[in-house]
Amino acid sequence: MGSGKSRSGATRRAVLVVGGVTLLAAVWRDPSGHPSSADPAGGIHVDAAHPHPTAHPTPPPHPTRRAGTAGRAHPARHADPQKPPRRPRGPRRDEPGEIVYHVRDGRKGIALTIDDGPSPEYTPQVLRLLEKYRVTATFSMIGLEVAACPGLVREVAAAGHKIANHTWSHLDLAALPPVTVADQMDRATGAIHQVTGREPALFRAPYGAWSPAVLERCVRSGMTPLDWSVDPRDWSRPGVTSIVSNIMRNTRTGSIILEHDGGGNRAQTIAALKIVLPRLLASGYHFTTP
């Protein structure tokens, strides 16, 4: 009986050894170099035609898809919220429909924009100051005023300044339907073209109020949307000292300064320009146009 138990134990050990060798062979690499793979239950995939386990490499997982990416493997890129939406500047052409908030014309290059004119009273005063300090500016003109003062518009153009479209009657375009937006912009372009022989390449939205309809019309009409980065609120007549300090405090390389020659009493604006123009030039700034 002792020998029978010995033989039985030996037999069991032999079976265990053979089973262990078989298992090791299953998880080892096959001649192709690929690891064998187990089925979900932990067994080995064995092809009836091939006595040895066959390797089935697991395919790589699909990229994680985030909600709102419409099934794309990678989420859409978003602009850094800390950076202005604002387009590439300078020698490069701006992308169609991209709003311009700054200019690039080297170190301390800045721009001056004059809105809401032309005005028979204040535009000539602004022109004299610009001529005195050899500054070129951009005048954002309202179509109604262009039609009323064609000679003054031609004078601005003849002096080498740019003329931007500022709509026909200075309405808040963001609150208007596309058909009205188009009419306001197109009528102003027509008035400027009739007087100067040129269509404006720049468009400034009244109140800086932009909308998809406005930007789309800019693209269709070939005008670059022009905004600003320094607003001394001269239109509210806060006082000459306030206008001057605001401009000097906030102007830096690339700034677009907003001022007005129309829309009301602009005596404070004229007085402020008499101070800030020589100060900015003395500080090393030079003026360009968008």
Image (cartoon, rainbow, N blue to C red):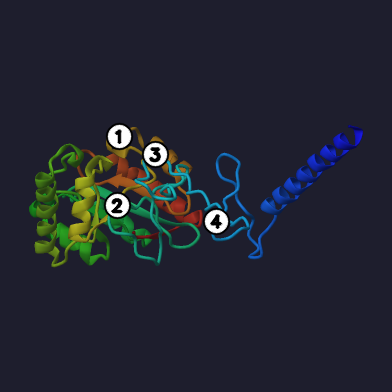
Residue type at the position of mark 3:
Ala
Q: Dot 1, crowdedness within 10 Å: few (<14), some or many (≥20)?
A: some
Q: Are marks 4 and 1 in contact (CB under 8 Å)?
A: no
* Residue 55: image tag: none
- Pointer 3 local density, CA inside 10 Å: few below 14, some 14–19, many at least 20: few
**Is residue 2 in sight in this rendering?**
yes
Residue sitting nearer the eye, 134 or 92: 92
Q: Could you tell me which quadrant the N terminus lies in? A: top right
Disc 3 designates what residue?
A: 67
Gap in angstroms between the C-alphas marked 4 and 2? 71 Å
Label 1 sits on a secondary structure element that is: loop
| Amino acid type, callout 4 | Asp
Q: Nearer the viewer, mark 4 or mark 3?
A: 4
Q: Residue 97 sits in which quadrant?
A: bottom left
The residue that disc 2 covers is 226
Which quadrant of the figure contains the C terminus? Answer: bottom left
Q: Position of residue 35 (x, y in %)?
A: 64, 56
Mark sitting on residue 47: 4
The residue depicted at 25 percent of the width and 41 percent of the height is 209
Quick one: label 4 or label 1, which is nearer the N terminus? Answer: 4
Mark found first going from the N terminus, 4 or 3: 4
Image vertical order of residue 244 relative to residue 55, above or below: above
45 vs 161: above or below: above
Label 2 secondary element: loop
Q: Residue at x 12, y 41 (%)?
A: 177
Where is mark 1, residue-wise? 237
Q: For the point 43% across and 47% down, which residue is it?
A: 75
Of the image marks 1 and 3, the number of the one nearer the N terminus: 3
